[in-house]
Amino acid sequence: QSALTQPASVSGSPGQSITISCTGTRSDVGSYNLVSWYQQHPGTAPKLMIYEGTKRPSGVSNRFSGSKSGNTASLTISGLQAEDEADYYCCSYALPSTRVFGGGTKLTVL
Amino acid sequence: QVQLVQSGSELKEPGASVKLSCKASGYTFTTYAMHWVRQAPGQGIEWMGWINTNSGNPTYAQGFTGRFVFSLDTSVSTAYLQISSLKAEDTAVYYCAREDDYSFDNWGQGTLVTVSS
């Protein structure tokens, strides 16, 4: 199972919107609406931001949203804030009952 | 509240074995699967596999078969990861993570394993 493809880095200014893509295949992202997104600040454990492609856990800001088109899932962060600066990882369900992560994207808030 | 508390850092020599623990609290342990992931220094997250906490049946990702063993002690709501024949490239932070709705909604704080002579 190959890792999902994410851009190594993205950046944006406070208040702007950014989108992070996560490209897989028909065997994972393309076949299931089961992509999740995680935010990881340095030295801390990842935090769930989006699950089942578009759903936000309780407590996660509505500035975070998820979508999917074909084999590519996306995470959009609107109204960028300094505290959004972190690494972001996507993860997809894949058969048989496995998971695959993306390589991670470093978000810099300028 | 849900908590996953992992055991402390380990320093091991190449060829040794290590057993990491992940103690769950705040929910019924056998209701949710437990996954393990690895993050080497400065690198991304790798999914290692998961264990069905009801049946004890483990599933290992490619690249994590043979030297890696997932186990449980449901009496103390604890999952374990044992790694044998440690290599330098096993140096990483290992996380346990609870699965809910096909995602990882709660994570342990991570255990740093350093393999060095």
Image: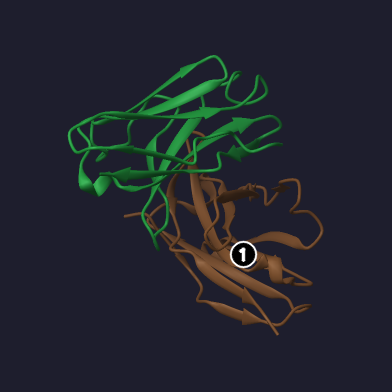
Chain colours: A green, B brown
Crowding at label 1, few (<14), some or many (≥20) Cα neighbours within 10 Å? Answer: many
Quarter that holds the C terminus of chain A: top left
Query: What SS does tag 1 mark?
Result: strand
Residue B105 lies, in percent from the top left, at 42, 44
Q: Nearer the viewer, residue A71 or A20?
A: A20
Give the residue at x 51% y 45%.
B31
Give the residue at x 42% y 51%.
A46
| Residue at the extreme top of the image, as rendered | A70
Q: Nearer the viewer, residue A5 or B92?
A: A5
Q: Nearer the viewer, residue B97 or B73?
A: B97
For residue B98, above or below residue A91: below
Give the residue at x 43% y 63%.
B109
Residue A58 lies, in percent from the top left, at 27, 37
Residue A94 lies, in percent from the top left, at 64, 30
How many numbered markers are drawn?
A: 1
The amino acid type, in three-letter code, at marker 1 is Tyr
Residue indicated by mark 1 = B80
Horizontal side of residue B104 vs B69, given as left or right? left
Residue A45 lies, in percent from the top left, at 42, 57
Horizontal side of residue A17 vs B45, given as left or right? left
Dot 1: chain letter? B
Quarter that holds the N terminus of chain A: top right
Quarter of the figure with residue A97: top right
